[in-house]
Amino acid sequence: MALNLDKNLKLYYSIKEVAEMFGVNESTLRYWEQEFPYLKPKTSGPAKIRQYQEKDIEQIRLIHNLVKVRGFKLAAAKKIINSNRDGADRKAEVLTKLITVRDDLQALKRQLDYLQ
């Protein structure tokens, strides 16, 4: 069996790391935890330090897509998620892939411009 070097081996992320991933404040993530009941990161120790797993990050990605990227209010985002969870997930996944492709194409264009 070949070693998969692309696989993310990190199990838990701090609130600071997750906030940086999405370009939001830590307080925004805490607020979203209050507004979206299914977003519950693991907490540890007496200080209740949040530990986000991949499933939590996927939830945040969906919320971020609806609220920050597409501009929905929190109430509308909740309604979309509750009424059409699968459709919202698919749209967020497609958007993420499109952004990745765009970034790759822009990098390729910069390389081609450099060669000319």
Image (tube, grey):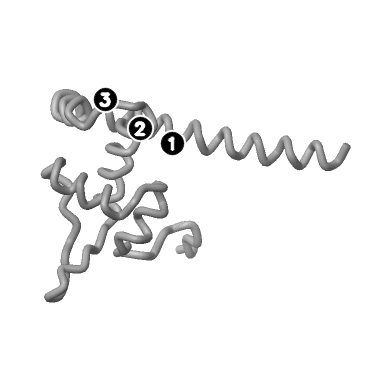
For mark 3, does the 10 Å Cα neighbourhood hold few (<14), some (14 to 19), or many (20 or more) residues?
A: few
Q: What element carries label 1?
A: helix
Q: Residue furthest bottom?
A: 46
Q: Which of 47 and 14 is in front in this view?
A: 47
Q: In this view, does 69 lie above or below 115?
A: above
Label ID, residue 87: 3
First in sequence, mark 2 or 3: give its number: 3
To which residue does mark 2 refer? Answer: 92
In this picture, residue 47 sits left or right of residue 70: left
Q: Do the residues labelled 1 and 2 touch (CB within 8 Å)?
A: yes
In this picture, residue 103 sits left or right of residue 70: right
The image quadrant where one finds the C terminus is top right
**Spot occupied by residue 101 in the image (x, y as percentages of width and height):** 56, 35
For mark 2, does the 10 Å Cα neighbourhood hold few (<14), some (14 to 19), or many (20 or more) residues?
A: many
- The quarter holding residue 52 reads bottom left
Q: Please state which amino acid type lies under the numbered disc 2.
A: Ala
- The quarter holding residue 94 reads top left
In this picture, residue 20 sits left or right of residue 31: right
Label ID, residue 12: none
